[in-house]
Image: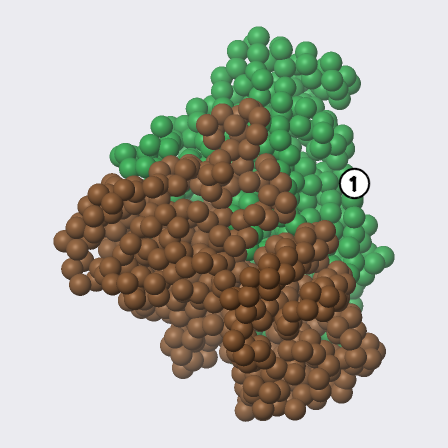
Chain colours: A brown, B green
Amino acid sequence: MTLSTLAGAAGPAVAPPPPRPDQAAVEAVLTALRDTFGELVTTAAATREQHANSASWIVAQPPDAVVFPQCTADVQKIVRICAAHRVPIVPFGTGTSLEGQINAPFGGVSVDTRDMNRVLAVHADDLDVVVEPGVTRKQLNEHLRDQGLFFPLDPGADAALGGMAATRCSGTNAVRYGTMKDVTLALKAVLANGELMTTARRAKKSSAGYDLTRLFVGSEGTLGIITELTLKLHGIPEAIAGGVCPFPTVEAACKAVIATIQIGIPVARIELMDALQVKAVNAYSRLSLPETPVLFVEFHGSPASVAEQSEHFGEIAAEHGGGPFDWATLPEERSRLWQARHDAYWAANALRRGAKAIASDVCVPISRLAECVTATQADIAASGLVAPIVGHVGDGNFHLALMVDTEDRDEVVRAEALLERMVERALAMDGTCTGEHGIGQGKMKYLKAELGAPALAVMAAVKAALDPAGIMNPGKIVAAG
Amino acid sequence: MTLSTLAGAAGPAVAPPPPRPDQAAVEAVLTALRDTFGELVTTAAATREQHANSASWIVAQPPDAVVFPQCTADVQKIVRICAAHRVPIVPFGTGTSLEGQINAPFGGVSVDTRDMNRVLAVHADDLDVVVEPGVTRKQLNEHLRDQGLFFPLDPGADAALGGMAATRCSGTNAVRYGTMKDVTLALKAVLANGELMTTARRAKKSSAGYDLTRLFVGSEGTLGIITELTLKLHGIPEAIAGGVCPFPTVEAACKAVIATIQIGIPVARIELMDALQVKAVNAYSRLSLPETPVLFVEFHGSPASVAEQSEHFGEIAAEHGGGPFDWATLPEERSRLWQARHDAYWAANALRRGAKAIASDVCVPISRLAECVTATQADIAASGLVAPIVGHVGDGNFHLALMVDTEDRDEVVRAEALLERMVERALAMDGTCTGEHGIGQGKMKYLKAELGAPALAVMAAVKAALDPAGIMNPGKIVAAG
């Protein structure tokens, strides 16, 4: 069906239908898994629920079982057992994804890679590292510190690197160091038939065939399970400078960001908080920042270079009515500020008792960023909702933390409508429905509006070609209609 | 077949069998093309031959006809006409690819995008540009100059941007600015069924589903024809400094490169020439460089930053026995040097009368670069061949220009064996058989050794899913066995 569709018939191709395993199939898988993995398989309710629990409002859909593979061969065994009975497989890292990626809407087995957490090789001369998927970014940086190296990507949460690759994660450093698509040199992944695929060698670049590394980065476990990653590293910068710069308006802050990027200042992080978020952070982290829009900025380089960058940025900020930009190279002061930035989500949560912060993100061309943020703020005000904004504005990416009382049906409806308008606004500005959280279940409904039917047909055809039985994380990204 | 193979059967999947159109099918296509495009279709022998002619020793295989579409809708019409008769389609940019990508081994229609050469939009604030595929990199930079912007990728040849994306091109600036996979924000491509697909919006990053942009970058026309590209731009650097630095050995030069990269100097270009190549360049470009291995180096940034980078690099070079590193910021001197670097291919050609320079590249982890280059030099000497080496060494990528008398069968055999050993050496060092020339026809035989059967099966499955009739540039990258 898929093939003939792309060959010319009308209408978009569709992904393979999700498996709907009967209880007998699940029991058969559980028996086989227990025979093979013993205590490393569990069906305990608490564990199953924890494996479908995330900081989103997407309803949790627990798997039938959770299994903890110890190595790649274990993952292959699990996939072969599940494939034999057409039972779904849902990969799990640290459970910090935000769009329902870890849910099991058709039941099946959650494959938790927490024990596959070895750093397999550090190649200091080549600035790369080989890791198992359960290694977290903080664990990796702890491991690397003595060698003067670091892994730059920082989504806030201490996510597992396998999950970060699977969701094409980025975060605060992406403006300088790129996203997971840029820092992933090669992957190993177990395919739907249990075979282990290598996507690339360790050379820094290659033009050898289809870019399977990038095809799997961001595929959210729907094409296979990542079991090994080769990642690019950087030398720890000789000097780091940073600080906070207030602006009279979001628009002024965004214009300063555009000028900074355009003039080529290699800013390492440039993060917007709107006035409400600053207020939340002041309360939560006991800071006394001016309660106006601010930019948190950081520069990496030689001492002379970071001083030059900081001064140059201060001038740009002043030209746009911002400042003063007080910058420092002292680690303590910087750490305190960035901790506050990272705690923005918790600070938002503390804004309103009894409410849950629902995080959602969009990304637009940077020229439209001020307009998009300002229109979204007006929409929040008109909706009578509480929703501070933070943004990786160097990339045109920003997040709402919608403070929702999920028991209040009317409020939930207004919040959903607000998020839908935010996505429509981003798409109307040639942006994307998600800069860094992925599609999962939560944003599937926007994908066609963003990319059109032919792109969806191609995604469905790729999915059907690589996972014809539809067992790999079904119900995410592309799914049968 | 493909689906069931990935579902679990033994052996790798295979790509769809290439079409073998009979003369009647070709005649039917020609009639339909002439009806639609009139004078823009030709079957003149000279034009057909020119469309299969490249600077490689791969035997030219001309298409049955060449057609010159004027717009995307024309490309869709061509694809639909060819698809109806299962006649192959071979995209053509400027014909500067090196591994047989433009050949028509099964006949068919060469689709030359030379007239699709409009710059559709420059978004200066967003640092991006939208172009048709026939725009060349020099044409684009000419267009951008007044706005203080530039497109960094520079493969030497004035290639068309569509072809550069299709072959995942990189070149001298890639160490700083990345390859086509990094600078391509979005593509439009005509699929095998004639539908037009958009891979992404114009946002700087996105995690919206499978990375179709990167799937098509490097796919060499085997999945579709690129008809529009959105590319990242950069501000023209405030200052550029550069120069040439001699080293006693290739190994010393490579070690200086590793130290430069590892310490985080944001070098814009760092290019190795071995002593033979320097000798060729001195003769061809009337320079008087020391005839030892040299690095051509360039730095981009503020005046203070490029001075700091240049001095720092000079110190590193001296620590490795290199130098003196004379650097300058004067455009004239730099242009003269880089012109010489770009003329390296022609300089090599002039080394030996009656011989043709056959270019081939590999890429290895940078820690293995010195060893790989040195072993390759020894192999060249033992083979009694003439083959200067140039390299984009910041990426671990280097090229041989094998000076071969293609009439001398024995010499051709020795040269082929030498190239085969170079690839084997690179693969043994965890490198790739091609850093930037692509697979085409010339390197298909190495792909399985590089990536293994499962990766090839995935490529074949993707190819079969998107091009079930096998009409899109058949016989390249993955093909029926």
Q: Residue furthest left?
A: A35
Vertical comparison of A102 with A264: above or below: above
Q: Percent from the top left, x then y, of residue B381? A: 43, 50
Q: Residue at x 57, y 26 (%)?
A: A10
Residue A262 point in image, percent of width and height: 75, 66
Does residue B38 appear in this view? yes
> In the image, what residue occupies the spot 61% across and 90% down?
A287
Residue positioned 54% across, 91% down in the render = A332
**Farthest residue, direction top:** B24
When asked about the image quadrant of residue A139, the answer is bottom left
Q: Is residue B457 visible to the viewer in this orientation of the structure?
A: no
Q: In the rendered structure, which amino acid carries the disc numbered 1? A: Arg
Residue B80 placement (x, y as % from top left):
62, 22
Q: Quadrant of residue A70?
A: bottom left
Q: Secondary structure at mark 1?
A: loop
Q: Nearer the viewer, residue A57 or B202?
A: A57
Label 1 resides on the chain identified as B
On screen, residue B422 above or below A1: below
Residue B357: give x, y in percent of width and height.
57, 41
Q: Nearer the viewer, residue A292 or A69?
A: A292
Q: Quadrant of residue B68?
A: top right
* Location of mark 1 (residue): B118
Foreground of the two, B119 or B330 = B119
